[in-house]
């Protein structure tokens, strides 16, 4: 297969794969670094490189799950609180081998939409790299990420666009 055919095949196979389908097999640090490195090749106007990723694994990931569950519980009126949703938040994060926060850093040098687009292209590169390496992944953007302050160090000119879940699949 030539490069164009390989690329076409990877693009066609790219899909969101959810944590419930991840195996217990741990991803290597090298593959995580390869996934994050692929993001840095996304086009970005004036080379602002507006993406920021923080990877959560192990105990840090468990802390993120607890924080998100607490935020969900605290932000929902009692009549709208769903125990299933609360449990799902923890399950998804804990079932993933790694979770990366997706942060856009607004430089002020270009329109904000361009930097959001650049981050989106960076995430697409991550999706394609995961697909090529048989890693399941998906981008989730629940409203409660706006309230994630303890786990993420978000500066005044930044915004969390969601979480990128990753895990090995069969």
Image: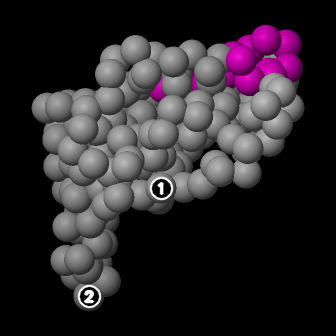
- Image coordinates for residue 142, horizontal then vertical, percent: 46, 58
- Please give the name of the residue rendered at 20% of the width and 67% of the height, measured from the top-left corner: 87
- Please give the name of the residue rendered at 25% of the width and 32% of the height, measured from the top-left corner: 26
Q: Between residues 5 and 44, which one lies in front from this camera angle?
A: 5
On screen, residue 155 versus residue 119, left or right, reads: left
- Is 66 rendered above or below residue 124? below
The residue range painted magenta reads 41-53
For this orientation, the residue located farthest to the left is 59
Q: Is residue 160 visible?
A: no
- Is 46 rendered above or below residue 157? above
- Image coordinates for residue 20, horizontal then vertical, percent: 31, 61
- Is 10 rendered above or below residue 81? above
- Image coordinates for residue 132, horizontal then vertical, percent: 58, 34
- Is 168 rendered above or below residue 133? below
Q: Between residues 111 and 4, which one lies in front from this camera angle?
A: 4
Q: Between residues 30 and 65, which one lies in front from this camera angle?
A: 30
Determine crowd level at label 2: few under 14, some 14-19, many 20+ residues with C-alpha closer than 10 A.
Answer: few
**Circle 2 is placed at which residue position?**
79
- Image coordinates for residue 114, horizontal then vertical, percent: 81, 33
**Circle 1 is placed at which residue position?**
17
- Please give the name of the residue rendered at 17% of the width and 31% of the height, measured from the top-left corner: 58
- Please give the name of the residue rendered at 22% of the width and 58% of the height, measured from the top-left corner: 91
As for residue 30 lying within the magenta part, the answer is no
Query: Exactly how many numbered labels are in the figure?
Result: 2
**What distance separates the C-alpha of mark 1 from that of mark 2?**
31 Å
């Amino acid at each position: 297969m030539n490069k164009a055919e390989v690329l076409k095949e990877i693009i066609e196979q790219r899909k969101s794969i959810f944590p419930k389908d991840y195996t217990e097999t741990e991803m290597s640090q090298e593959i995580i670094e390869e996934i994050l490195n692929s993001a840095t090749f996304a086009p970005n106007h004036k080379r602002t490189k507006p993406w920021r990723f923080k990877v959560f694994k192990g105990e840090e990931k468990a802390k993120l799950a607890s924080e998100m569950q607490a935020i969900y519980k605290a932000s929902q009126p009692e009549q709208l609180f769903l125990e299933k949703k609360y449990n799902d938040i923890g399950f998804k994060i804990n079932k993933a081998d790694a979770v990366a926060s997706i942060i856009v850093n607004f430089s002020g040098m270009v329109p904000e939409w361009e930097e959001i687009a650049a981050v989106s292209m960076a995430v697409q590169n991550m999706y394609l790299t995961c697909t090529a390496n048989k890693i399941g992944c998906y981008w989730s953007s629940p409203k409660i990420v706006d309230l994630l302050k303890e786990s993420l160090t978000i500066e005044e000119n930044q915004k969390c666009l969601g979480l990128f879940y990753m895990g090995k699949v069969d």
